[in-house]
Image: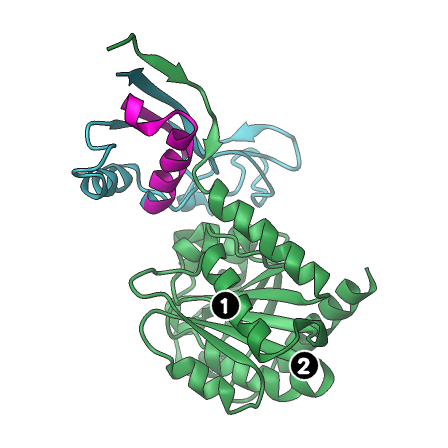
């Protein structure tokens, strides 16, 4: 995932002329229902970019809650592992996921040299 | 130095992989070749499943395998004995196949056989219940294996893998009489995580369930070919 993030940043920077910019912050939106542990992503990113053009950049992560929709009564709810992800209102299985699968670079804060 | 600028790009971190996966899928479609991504934890029985499956399947359909493995070609060597085209993909330290690796594997397969002559490509992913679930490879269907020795709770502990799967094979069911294992609880946990998945109980020892699994594959191939 860290490699994918760095490749995405490289791709973005190519369009901006990498040598003329300094990236200050990479603002991510990471859903709770993904395979990404935010602190691990930050740590591995920081280790991977040491000495590179992204060395001085900081990662911020906005966690997007895992939210489902009850297929019986249409109420939104926050699925919990302890409850088998079922809706608390009708005890229905998790069918529709409203949010929580996000793996996004929301924005990049940078300065021109 | 100028004032900071905020570029709001809203870009999927995995977009490069998704883009390559889309290209792989277009290739599979042009070859009229159905691709299944076979995933599980290590030791759930993926390779043995393929050995038994391909013995029968290759009599009806032209089949090939891309065999993902971190460090060895041991699984690929087992499958090559079935006289079907097998391409090993050694991922090194990577714990999953990504779309680029599968694209490379497909290029090697093209050197072995004209993929237009094939009906199905089975991709055995690296044994791991986490990362393979997030990385599309261009497959048409995802198949997840879960052996009963892993415990009833795994669909809840690794929900993304089981949420993403189109078919879940519960393997090693021949061991049921010897274990304190509640298969109904497992099925309930699967349904909680992914109510839309097909579920088949299977044993590579007794061969129970293989008729249903072969039937599932055959129907998918025929439907794909007719579309």
Is B213 covered by the magenta stretch? no
Q: Position of residue B9 (x, y in %)?
A: 46, 24
Look at the image and give the residue range highlighted in magenta: A3-30
Disc 2 from disc 1: Cα separation: 29 Å
* Disc nearer the start of the sequence (2/1): 1
Q: Position of residue B126 (x, y in %)?
A: 41, 66
Quadrant showing the C terminus of chain B? bottom right
In the picture, residue A108 is in which quadrant?
A: top left
> Does residue B111 sit above or below B101 in this rendering?
below
In the picture, residue B117 is in which quadrant?
A: bottom right
Q: Which mark identifies residue B211?
A: 2
* SS type, badge 1: helix
**Residue drawn at point x = 70 percent, y = 59 percent:** B29
Q: Is residue B201 visible?
A: no
Q: Position of residue A39 (x, y in %)?
A: 25, 37
Quadrant showing the N terminus of chain B? top left
- Residue hosting label 1: B105
Q: Residues within 10 Å of mark 2 (few under 14, many from 20)?
A: few
Disc 1: which chain? B
Instruction: Work out which residue is located at the far top of the displayed protein and give it.
Output: B3
Nearest to the observer: residue A99 or residue B136: B136
Chain letter for green? B
Q: Is residue A46 shown left or right of residue A70?
A: left
Chain A: give its colour.
Answer: cyan
């Amino acid at each position: 995932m860290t490699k994918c993030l760095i490749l995405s940043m490289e791709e973005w920077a190519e369009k901006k002329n990498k040598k003329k910019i300094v990236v200050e912050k990479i603002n991510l939106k990471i859903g709770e229902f993904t395979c990404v542990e935010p602190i691990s992503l930050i740590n591995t990113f920081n280790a991977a970019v040491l000495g590179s053009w992204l060395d001085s950049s900081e990662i911020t992560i906005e966690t997007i809650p895992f939210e489902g929709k009850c297929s019986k009564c249409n109420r939104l709810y926050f699925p919990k592992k302890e409850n088998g992800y079922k809706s608390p209102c009708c005890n229905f299985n998790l069918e529709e996921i409203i949010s929580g699968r996000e793996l996004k670079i929301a924005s990049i804060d940078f300065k021109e040299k | 130095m100028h004032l900071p600028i905020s570029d709001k790009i809203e870009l999927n971190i995995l977009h490069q992989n998704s883009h390559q996966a889309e290209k792989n899928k277009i290739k599979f479609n042009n070859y009229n070749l159905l691709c299944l991504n076979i995933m599980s934890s290590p030791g759930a029985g993926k390779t043995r499943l393929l050995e038994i499956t391909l013995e029968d399947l290759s009599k009806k359909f032209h089949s090939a395998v891309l065999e993902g493995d971190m460090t060895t070609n041991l699984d690929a060597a087992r499958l090559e004995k079935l006289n079907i085209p097998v391409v090993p993909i050694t991922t090194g330290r990577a714990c999953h196949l990504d779309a680029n690796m599968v694209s490379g594997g497909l290029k090697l397969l093209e050197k072995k056989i004209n993929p237009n002559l094939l009906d199905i490509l089975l991709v055995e992913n690296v044994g791991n219940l986490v990362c393979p679930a997030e990385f599309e490879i261009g497959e048409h269907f995802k198949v997840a294996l879960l052996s009963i020795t892993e415990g009833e709770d795994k669909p809840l502990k690794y929900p993304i893998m089981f949420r993403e799967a189109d078919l879940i094979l519960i393997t090693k069911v021949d061991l049921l009489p010897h274990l304190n294992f509640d298969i109904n609880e497992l099925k309930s946990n699967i349904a909680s995580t992914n109510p839309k998945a097909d579920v088949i109980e299977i044993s590579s020892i007794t061969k129970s369930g293989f008729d249903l699994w072969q039937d599932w594959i055959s129907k998918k191939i025929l439907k794909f070919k007719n579309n």
